[in-house]
Image (tube, rainbow, N blue to C red):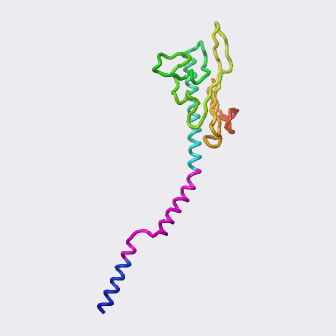
Amino acid sequence: MNRTSSYLSGRRSARRAAEANGFTLMELLIVIAIILILMLMAIPTIGSLTKKANETSAINSVQTITKAEIQYNSTYPANGYACTLAALGGDPNSGPPTPNAAQILQGDLTSGFKSGYIFNISCKDKVSVNGTDRYTSYTITAVPQTVGKTGDRGFCSDQFGVVKYDATGGTNCTQSLQ
């Protein structure tokens, strides 16, 4: 009887040692499969969040450029509005601001590329006073670098400061932002 008892207790301790050794291969594979499924569900959400963040950045950048245009117009009234992003930018270490480098905008916007969008300014109407052209209107455009990937909508603004959008990602902005 003593033998049987020691045999059973040895068998129980061997079973406990096997159970206490961690996860089985099957359990690990199931956990990895669940993690992969969750990641696959999250990837489209991350892409749409990135596009939304790019669009929000583009709207804020258009508003920033509009404010810079107002400041440029009040600083250089003989010139009117700036017709290029470079005229609103400039290096502060290169000397005092000039009409060609007003040092109002940061370098990330004056490059014309930011957060998946391409920015541009074009002047429309001008008046000549004493041989100097004074621009009285402008249009700011922001279009996605790749429509559907970096953004879905294009954004526009003008001297009136209203930001509108084009749902197809172009520059035919007819719908006001709400």
Name the image quarter holding the N terminus: bottom left
Find residue 43 and report its horizontal and vertical position in percent.
57, 51
| Residue at left offset 62%, top offset 25% | 121
Q: Residue lying at the far left in this picture: please name it.
A: 2
Q: Does residue 153 appear left or right of residue 102 in this picture?
A: right
Q: Which residues are magenta?
A: 16-44
Q: Does any portion of residue 178 appear in the rendered image?
A: no
Q: Quadrant of residue 163?
A: top right
Find residue 147 and report its horizontal and vertical position in percent.
65, 40
Q: Quadrant of residue 58?
A: top right
Q: Give the vertical position of 138 relative to 25 (above or below).
A: above
Main SS, magenta residues? helix
Indicate yes or no whether the magenta region holds residue 25.
Answer: yes
Q: Does residue 22 appear left or right of residue 3 in this picture?
A: right
Q: Does any portion of residue 135 appear in the rendered image?
A: yes
Find residue 59 and report its horizontal and vertical position in percent.
59, 34
Residue closest to the eye, 141 or 28: 28
Indicate yes or no whether the magenta region holds residue 122.
Answer: no
| Residue at left offset 55%, top offset 27% | 110
| Residue at left offset 33%, top offset 82% | 10
| Residue at left offset 67%, top offset 13% | 127
Residue closest to the eye, 160 or 112: 112
